[in-house]
Image (spheres, helix red, strand yellow):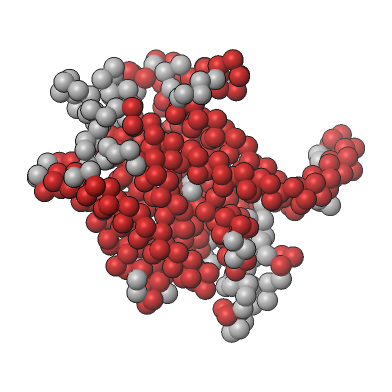
């Protein structure tokens, strides 16, 4: 059985696979598109204009990306705040997914900003604007991204402490680097709980503030989505999608790397999704009824159809599946239910930032250019590629069993 000391280990699989080559090619395409954008401007790459100042690079790459990275803070809260240690085996992959998600959100935002060279301004107190929701989002994202990298440091220490082998003349620094790593490990072990708590708080703040951004346009957002509760609904949906993202990441990694899915951890984890998704759906329905916006549900408009698609795919379907214990314990059905929750959040962010938002009196219609779409695909591929690199080098994934063990599947450590 795997012991706590070697709960995680680097991936022991060949790296140069056809899949990795495809991911690398798509990522290089995204880099080329970004370079073209920096040289020739947004208008040369996107279909954005003064009427539609944002498109899928904000709705998908930023707003959706931040929401789908919520598995990091929801899992951290479950394991380290509520002390559900049974789920500790999935915390590192969830942390890595969140770290990469926020990193690529920052990179995508850099490409989308018109004055990208001013992205550092929020770091200066003289540039602060406390009345701006976007300022709060920027500060929390920067702070949380820093926290995520600090939370990753123990994996760095675990990988290289006692194994520092610098090349060439740098080898003289092996002992000094090893000392720094040991000091870092010792220090972080004493204060890590502070960063874990800070990560949960910061995530709750900026997840809700993303919804606050749309409150400044009451007459340009469709009544099905415009509500004073939008920040609260954004936070609830981010919390609800956190565990489904952990399930998808874990099962996808297991499938890609030829490992057994950890159903004895993922199946009970999915029970929380039923509770969280139920709260979100109840809040959504209550908001529509209180505002009397439910009348727009059956007006036959494109917006009403997109709203039903969002609710049907993202809430009703996964709830129907996850209420069944058989579905929760069947890998294919559990993956489908989790994927439905993720798809629902993606549709929700697209609805709020694109479908519901209509610039008043312009008659403008936005549809992303092919280069916008290819850039988004390339960024997703780049995230997957970097994930593969990191799990190959660092002890992120759960360690695999050395041999078959009939009792392993019912042990407290779970299937590895």
Picture quadrant where residue 248 is located: bottom left
The answer to which of 13 and 127 lies nearer the viewer is 127
Taking the view exactly as shown, the residue that stands out farthest to the left is 300
Residue found 24% across the figure and 28% down from its top = 220
The answer to which of 57 and 349 lies nearer the viewer is 349
Q: Is residue 140 left or right of residue 176?
A: left
Residue found 67% across the figure and 60% down from its top = 9
The answer to which of 398 and 63 lies nearer the viewer is 63
Q: Taking the image as drawn, is residue 366 in sight?
A: no
**Residue 337, percent across and down?**
35, 63
Picture quadrant where residue 83 is located: bottom right
Taking the view exactly as shown, the residue that stands out farthest to the bottom is 406
**Residue 386, percent across and down?**
55, 44
**Residue 275, percent across and down?**
40, 63
Taking the view exactly as shown, the residue that stands out farthest to the front is 290
Residue found 55% across the figure and 41% down from its top = 202
Q: Is residue 99 left or right of residue 308?
A: right
Q: Quadrant of the N terminus?
A: bottom right
Relative to 78, say whether 42 is above or below: above
Relative to 262, say whether 351 is above or below: above
Relative to 43, say whether 18 is above or below: below
Q: Taking the image as drawn, is residue 196 in sight?
A: yes
Residue found 52% across the figure and 17% down from its top = 118
Q: Is residue 85 left or right of residue 325?
A: right
**Residue 188, percent across and down?**
76, 47
Q: Quadrant of the C terminus?
A: bottom right
């Amino acid at each position: 059985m795997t012991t706590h000391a070697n709960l995680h280990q680097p991936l022991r699989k060949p790296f140069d696979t056809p899949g990795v080559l495809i991911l690398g090619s798509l990522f290089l395409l995204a880099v080329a598109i970004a370079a073209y954008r920096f040289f020739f401007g947004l208008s040369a790459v996107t279909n954005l204009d003064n009427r539609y100042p944002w498109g899928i690079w904000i709705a998908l790459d930023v707003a959706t990306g931040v929401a789908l990275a919520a598995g990091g803070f929801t899992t951290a809260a479950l394991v380290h705040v509520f002390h559900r240690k049974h789920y500790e085996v999935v915390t590192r992959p969830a942390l890595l997914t969140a770290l990469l998600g926020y990193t690529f959100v920052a990179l995508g935002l850099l490409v989308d900003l018109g004055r990208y060279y001013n992205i550092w301004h929020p770091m200066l107190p003289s540039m602060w604007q406390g009345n701006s929701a976007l300022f709060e989002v920027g500060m929390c994202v920067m702070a949380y991204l820093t926290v995520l990298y600090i939370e990753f440091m123990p994996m760095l220490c675990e990988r290289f402490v006692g194994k520092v082998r610098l090349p060439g003349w740098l080898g003289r620094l092996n002992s000094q680097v090893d000392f720094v790593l040991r000091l870092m490990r010792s220090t972080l072990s004493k204060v890590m709980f502070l960063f874990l708590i800070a990560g949960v708080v910061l995530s709750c703040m900026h997840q809700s503030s993303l919804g606050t951004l749309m409150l400044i346009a009451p007459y340009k957002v469709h009544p099905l989505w415009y509500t004073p509760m939008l920040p609260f609904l954004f936070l609830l949906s981010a919390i609800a999608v956190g565990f489904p993202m952990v399930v998808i990441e874990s099962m996808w990694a297991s499938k890609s790397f030829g490992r057994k899915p950890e159903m004895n951890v993922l199946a009970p984890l999915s029970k929380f999704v039923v509770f969280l998704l139920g709260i979100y759906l109840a809040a959504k329905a209550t908001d529509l009824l209180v505002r009397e916006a439910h009348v727009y549900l059956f007006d036959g408009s494109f917006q009403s159809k997109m709203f039903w698609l969002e609710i049907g795919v993202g809430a009703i379907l996964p709830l129907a599946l996850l209420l069944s214990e058989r579905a929760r314990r069947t890998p294919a059905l559990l993956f489908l239910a989790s994927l439905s929750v993720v798809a629902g959040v993606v549709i929700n962010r697209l609805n709020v930032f694109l479908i519901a938002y209509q610039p008043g009196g312009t008659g403008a219609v936005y549809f992303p250019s092919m280069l916008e779409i290819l850039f988004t695909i390339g960024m997703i591929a780049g995230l997957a590629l970097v994930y593969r690199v990191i799990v190959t080098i660092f002890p992120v994934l759960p360690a695999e069993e050395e041999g078959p063990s009939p009792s392993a599947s019912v042990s407290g450590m779970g299937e590895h």
